[in-house]
Amino acid sequence: MSYGLPTTSATTSSNSTTTLASQRSQYGASGSDAAAATGRRLTLNPEAPTFIPGRRLHQGVQERSNILSTLSDRQASEYQGVTPRTFHPGTKSSSPEAIEEEVSDAFAILNNKNFTEAEKAFRIILHKNQGILSSFDKQNITIGLARSLKEQTFEKQIEACSILEELRLDGTFTSFGASTTYHLDLTLSLCEEALGRHFDAELRLLRLREKRCNANEEVLCKPSRHYAADITNARLWQSMGKHRLAEALLMNIQAELINELQSKPYIPDTSKLRKYLDTVNVALGRIWQLMDKHHQSEELLLKTSHKRPDDPEEILCKPTGQRSIDLALVRIWETMDKNELAEKLLLNISGKNPNDNEETLCGSCGDHDLDLTLARLWQIIGRHKRAERLLLNMSGKHPGANRETLCKPCGNGQTDLALVRYWEQIGKNKLAEKLLLNMSGKHPDAREEILCVPCWRHVIDLSLVRHWQNTGKYKRAEKLLLNMIGTHPSDIEEILYGPSGNYDIDMARARLWQVMGKPEQTERLLLNICNKSLNDSEESLCRPCGHHDIDLALVCSWEMIGRNKWAQRLLRRCRDLYQTNECEYMLLTLSSGWPEFMEMISHYPESANTLLATSIHYFKLACEQIIKEGPEAGNDNLNKSLEILESLLEKYPSNAAAYSQKAHCLRMQGRSEQEWLECFGRAEAIDPARVYKVKSHFWRSNESTALQKVLASQVR
């Protein structure tokens, strides 16, 4: 029986990935683990800044926590009033059998992703049965409550960490410092990751897996047989940009699971092990997709689906019944520009047919994740009316509705935010802003102080920050961000540039200050996040911190400031450590625009990166000519830049960066706003994560100056 193990050709690459786990690592697992020059092992930096909410945030959270911890009978009855009848509302404690049934029902609600109702159910059980719950039941219910809180507001995520930390105090620990309570530390690591505390989550998972944080790569990537912790660790490394470590660990887990299933096919845990293997294969397919190993990813996912690349379309697009595998296959087909296959598989999963009428195609299938994936695919392939109609149907709205109705939240945050992003992509910024403000409980005409008060749902607050940043409302965006962490522009530098402990907020600050032309502030913040200082040696400053996006953001800041030597040294080490497409691309673009670029690029084999860097090279030259000689002077180089982009997109149709650069070229040529906005929208639809990265470069300031000259000439 095949368990989804790829063929020899799929598991071998130019980087010899199959032998990674047997090699001694140059780097540890840590935030300061990438000593590329020295090769010495470094610790995970357990003294990295821990999460300390801002003053105002902490006060609000503390008050809320006090209310929750002293839940009154009246409040409990309110919770019970909206809880399913299976929970038998009342203040009388339940029998052990009834408690077991109530807990089972609460977890069923949680597994159905109804997180607010699950929270209420767990709270009722805890409140109603105080003093009679067994130690195991209390632990189990508390962990269930924490899992439901983790998926909600930032305030509740903090509470989730707090109740789990409190639960740990009553338990015992392994020699590595991990809790022996089942699933406690695993859940706590996920809560820490949700709060943006990636290094804390990493250290906790390593302890749970019984690994020392300064161990070499062979040890770090060896499965612990605590498969849930191993897989969670690999996924965390993936989100931190440590694709090489994640890939090695996942491949080792995969090999161990396959060996166990083949040697002991009749053991009681076979079903569980197969589920783990499917999860590993999906995660590994995603890792390879991120590492541009698209054919390996497709082959693995097809094997996991029990399909072959040469199967007829009917078989390829037949759902497996396992949604995570099917959606992973949709994602890789999107990346490989096999959009017809991706669309047909999605429609089949949704119970639709390509020949259905528009009303049926654009109707919600009842599965939120499938609907959003289909809407995003239609955006990628340019079927914007279908995408908008589906999103509106999911929201219970009609395209012809008035503005007030269109901008009323539907109650599902993911659907509302998907509609916001769609409107932003097609230039309907007023609708997008109004919907965001309504989601925040604010009115567009409210005072600045009111508009910049956080609603404490971080995904909404950060979406509003990004929207204001993209529409040039920088001061407003900055004020909201600082209010989210309880700081003020007049605070002393140690507070203003200190890390909040929340990765998403800190990177949003870094992005905003970069766009506002404040690279020194961005640099100061990023160095503080990494526990570095400008007084450190160059060797220390140019050592990767262990988080891909933080390191590349620092490279961008140094490029803008003019610290090119540091930028190139750090970037080369990042390329060796992370081995990502983005690092290679940034190294090439650092040299573009200079006389020696064309000679240098001639030594590289042609790729999407070399084509894109060459296009940017001509674009930079065009901007310089426009600034010096006027708009007409840059035409030849702009045409060369566009010609290369068209060639790139013909060969690599799903390259988000190419669409973004095409938008820049079209805008510089004075083309219609609709034309270049569509290219920006296509780029974001292909790679939604683009908007969350610091990707400003020094040469973009030249572009801004040149663009002003082009716009001025059009007015005349």
Image (cartoon, rainbow, N blue to C red):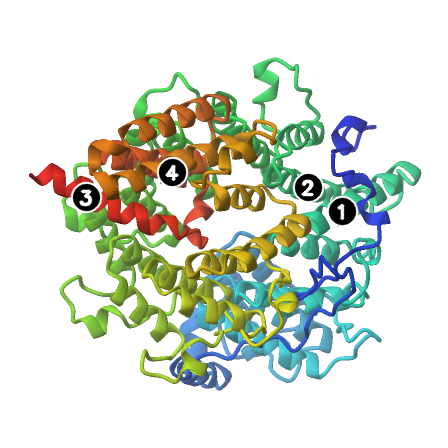
Q: Secondary structure at mark 3?
A: helix
Q: Secondary structure at mark 1?
A: helix
Q: Report which residue position mark 2 lands on.
A: 284
Mark 2 is surrounded, within 10 Å at the Cα level, by few (under 14), some (14 to 19) or many (20 or more) other residues, namely many
**Among numbered discs 1 and 2, the one appearing first in the sequence:** 1
Which quadrant holds the C terminus?
Answer: top left
Residues at marks 1 and 2 touching, judged by CB atoms closer than 8 Å: no
**Among numbered discs 4 and 1, the one appearing first in the sequence:** 1
Tag count: 4
Q: Which one is in front in this view, the residue at disc 1 or the one at disc 2?
A: 1
Looking at the image, can residue 557 be seen?
Answer: yes
Q: CA distance from mark 2 to mark 3?
A: 48 Å
Measuring 39% from the left and 85% from the top, which residue is drawn there? Answer: 492
Q: CA distance from mark 4 to mark 3?
A: 21 Å
Measuring 63% from the left and 60% from the top, which residue is drawn there? Answer: 544
**Residue 380 image position (x, y, % from top left):** 40, 32
Q: Secondary structure at mark 2?
A: helix
**Among numbered discs 2 and 4, the one appearing first in the sequence:** 2
Q: Report which residue position mark 1 lands on.
A: 248
Name the amino acid type tagged 2. Leu
**Among numbered discs 2 and 3, the one appearing first in the sequence:** 2
- Circle number at residue 709: 3
Q: Report which residue position mark 4 lands on.
A: 660
